């Protein structure tokens, strides 16, 4: 999973860049000045950094010079509307730098990012989809709460929902039927057969415990709190958690959702689904950004190894450097490889 750090003192500019790029399935985080960017780059690996030139504390060119001075060759996009030719020339001589002038268009941002990340446009996943089955005449749950790149579809009946899911499995399904929850759980089982990797939630008058359900991932109070969308539903079920690039399946961290049981469940589903969709016979599962404790990581790998082999896929696992030499003995037959 490619990681992008957006550095700008303007929250509006940061949001504009993130809104343009997140539909590609990249992991995106933000920093408000060059000093914060340097601190983040010292402890985390990034595949691309967008750096505004004019910022307080430490400007973009100063941050770029500091990165290069310590040997960090992460590709950088300098973004500004006021930089002089001399400033741009100085930055470009440092290597691995592109320049993006404000005001920029989404198409310019996309082209620049895909070029520097060496991602072919044909490899970009389609926009994520959310399917909402709502009671006839009811309001649309969470209308306007999703990022602009998320496609929200409506269905009036279970039959229509199944047709849509079979045609193109969505990332998330919300069932707002007005039926008792045990009946909704049974309906979710039918949906789950057609969309094994999707998050499936019931919408009810009030929230209910997250289990045990046979097929549902949980029950949300209707309408759900938009904060729940941003911090739980989107990062775990709509944002891609696993993307296949050739025979490598890159796995994302939990983002704002944090590490918890739901992250592990969603991760197992999406990795297996990504391998199946890509038609892989051999797959390298890149888990370097999965922030699990040793025991939980061993359990995850054991489960994935068993599920992938059951689907005719021979997996190998790339682990975080900190645990690469400490836990392989606990993994049994699972194959661990270097990055």
Image (spheres, rainbow, N blue to C red):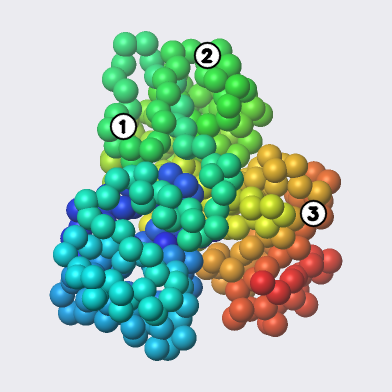
Residue 189 horizontal/vertical position (percent): 61, 28
Q: Earlier in the sequence, mark 2 or mark 3?
A: 2
Is 134 placed above or below 13 here?
A: above
In front of the other: 235 or 4: 4
Q: Splitting the image into 4 quarters, where does residue 297 fall?
A: bottom right
Q: Which mark is residue 142?
A: 1
The answer for how far apart the CA atoms under marks 2 and 1 are is: 20 Å
Percent across and percent down for residue 96 are 44, 72
Q: Is any atom of residue 223 visible in this view? A: no
Q: Is residue 6 left or right of residue 181?
A: left
The residue depicted at 36 percent of the width and 51 percent of the height is 109
Q: Residue at x 24, y 75 (%)?
A: 87
The residue beneath circle 3 is 282
Q: Nearer the viewer, residue 169 or 202?
A: 169
In this view, 306 is above or below 132? below
The nearer-to-camera label among 1 and 3 is: 3
Is 145 left, or right, of 250 in this rendering?
Answer: left
Is 323 on the left-hand or right-hand side of 98? right
Mark 3 crowd level (few <14, some 14–19, many ≥20, 10 Å Cα)? some
Which numbered disc covers residue 210?
Answer: none
**Residue visible at 74% across and 71% down in the picture:** 337
Q: Secondary structure at mark 3?
A: strand
Q: What residue sits right under mark 2 in the picture?
A: 160
């Amino acid at each position: 999973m490619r990681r992008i750090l957006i550095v700008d003192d303007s929250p509006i500019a940061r949001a504009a860049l993130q809104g343009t790029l997140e539909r590609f399935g990249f992991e995106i985080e933000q920093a408000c000045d060059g000093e914060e960017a340097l601190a983040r780059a010292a402890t985390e690996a990034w595949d691309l950094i967008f750096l505004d030139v004019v910022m307080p504390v430490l400007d973009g060119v100063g941050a770029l010079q500091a990165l290069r001075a310590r040997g960090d060759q992460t590709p950088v996009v300098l973004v500004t509307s006021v930089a002089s030719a001399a400033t741009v020339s100085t930055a470009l001589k440092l290597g691995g730098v592109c320049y993006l002038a404000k005001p920029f268009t989404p198409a310019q941002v996309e082209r620049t990012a895909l070029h520097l990340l060496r991602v072919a446009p044909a490899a970009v996943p389609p926009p994520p989809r959310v399917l909402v089955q709502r009671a006839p005449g009811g309001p649309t749950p969470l209308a306007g709460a999703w990022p602009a790149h998320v496609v929200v579809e409506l269905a009036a009946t279970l039959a229509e929902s199944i047709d849509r899911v079979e045609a193109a499995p969505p990332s998330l399904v919300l069932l707002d039927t007005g039926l008792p929850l045990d009946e909704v759980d049974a309906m979710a089982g039918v949906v789950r057969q057609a969309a094994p990797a999707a998050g499936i939630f019931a919408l009810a008058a009030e929230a209910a415990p997250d289990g045990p359900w046979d097929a549902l991932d949980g029950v949300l109070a209707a309408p759900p709190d938009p904060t729940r969308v941003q911090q739980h539903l989107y990062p775990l079920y709509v944002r891609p958690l696993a993307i296949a690039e050739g025979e490598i399946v890159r796995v994302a961290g939990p983002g704002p959702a944090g590490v918890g049981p739901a992250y592990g469940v969603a991760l197992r589903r999406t990795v297996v689904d990504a391998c199946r969709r890509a038609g892989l016979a051999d797959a390298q599962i890149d888990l370097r950004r999965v922030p699990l404790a040793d025991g939980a990581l061993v359990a995850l790998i054991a489960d994935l190894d068993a599920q992938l082999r059951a689907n005719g896929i021979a997996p190998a696992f790339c682990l975080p450097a900190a645990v690469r030499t400490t836990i392989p003995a606990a993994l049994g037959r699972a194959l661990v490889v270097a990055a």
